[in-house]
Amino acid sequence: MSGMRTGRQASWALKSAALLFLCVWLWPLSAAARADRIRFTEDGFVYIDGRPRLVIGLYENPEDDGVLKQVADSGFNLVRAGPDRQALDRLHKHGLYAWIPLGGTLALREGDDAGRAALTDTVRRFKDDPALLAWEAPDEALWMTWFASYQWLAFEMPETLSGIIAKAAANRSHEEVVRWQRMAEKASDLLWRSMWKEAEATLNTLWAELGTTNPKPDLYVTRRIEAARRLGDELTRGWEAVWELDQTHVMWQNHAPGNSIADMRYQNRGVNAAGCDIYPILFTTGEPGSILQNLDMTSVGTFTERNVAAAPGKACWMVLQGFGYHDIQEPLFPKDPVHGRRPTYKETRFMAYDALLHGADAILYWGTSYIEKDSQLWRDILSVAKELRALEPAIVGIKPPAAPAVVAETNWAAFDGGDPKLTLRRADDDWVLIAVNEARVGVAFDVRGLPSELNGRKLYRLYSGEEHVVDNGGFHDGIQQHDVHVYATSRRFEASLDYPYHA
């Protein structure tokens, strides 16, 4: 018995030695494999060249090299580029990364060998390009699947029905025509009440009585719901095909703000970064159909949180406003100097910080191709990018074990609650505290619970002459409505802006 035990021990020793040798021999390979995979911090900031980075991106790829240099010098590090080698080389020359939109080729139907070949060809051709940082799914794909039915059901179909009823009226009784008109009105009422099945059943009966059929049955909302589900499966299948070839770049999905969290989660299964575009200045000029309940600037933070919830454990990339609605001059947004105006500097800055404090890991701007490159808004966007880039070490820095608390004072507006939102980060030996006031009124507040090592240290309010000394873990200050304060133990986090904005 003892000899058997000794033999087993010797056998186990040999196996252990062999296993140890194998692990040591494979370690460099496995470490390299891990290094090759795309990595994110716990908070969702992507690693670029071995360190966590704040992504600041631009949908526009300016043709003017001087403008592109201005973009790079202002702190942007990501620009949209098509699958074009020359465009990628140009961005790389300016020290910028690129994302490539894969568009409809990403939506792979089951058994679509030709589609898979087209997708994998694009990935193979560009996956090793030094400028590439991310692949993007079709923009607002989920929303557009739904929205395809909106124009038809809300506007075109009622006109089509009215024309058919008017044509049929010549050979039918007045009572029949009135009944058809009431059926059409009932269907419209049901549609606006989102009672899709009931509305569609009423419409089908009406089409049949009119001796015709719905010319666009695929645009019924119930079918759009099914189409959205299919799209989620197709995009996931496409991302799986991309992942088989390339695990070193971000896979990103941008949504519109008007989607449910559950639907976005289904669409986000294959990505490692997701977010939405949100442009609240000024979103509506009174037309029906605005899907945002909150038209305030704080909707940026609200929708950031929704997109964090829609992609749990993944990065959140938010797309912010780089235009005024009068710039794009679409039919729903007529040129209006008030309701279609461009964001101010203060609004542009607020929306960026509001997104970050609600969980965004990247800030991107859409619509700058519509504005002049000597305009105030363009200069404002560049200044905000500079400010964020200078603050990057703190933005991606270490959170303390316990977050500080903030308590707002009651003010002349009988203000209750709505304390400024705070985030505290450490970067090396320095600390940075960011405060965002989402209220419509200015607020005086007390910060409490700062780390004990800050007691007696000076906090500079960046881009101002103000200083605060931390006493017993806190300090007192006030902040204007919809404003941002950045406090730091060093002014090294201040960017060199072209012109001052703060007192």
Image (spheres, helix red, strand yellow):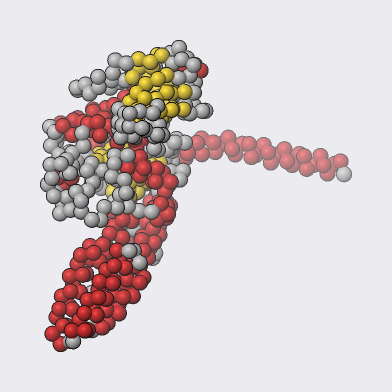
Which of these two is toward me, 84 or 69? 69
The residue lying at 32 percent from left, 49 percent from top is: 293
Q: Which residue is most to the right?
A: 1
The residue lying at 37 percent from left, 56 percent from top is: 235
The residue lying at 40 percent from left, 56 percent from top is: 263
Give above or below for 29 relative to 464: below
Q: x, y (%) of residue 62?
A: 17, 38
Q: Quadrant of the C terminus?
A: top left
Q: Is residue 237 left or right of residue 290?
A: right
Examine the rendering and report whether any part of residue 434 can be seen.
Answer: no
Give above or below for 79 relative to 231: above
Q: x, y (%) of residue 272?
A: 41, 45
Q: x, y (%) of residue 271?
A: 40, 48
Q: Which residue is most to the top?
A: 456
Give above or below for 210 relative to 380: below
Q: x, y (%) of residue 341?
A: 16, 40
Q: Is residue 311 left or right of residue 146?
A: right
Q: Quadrant of the N terminus?
A: top right
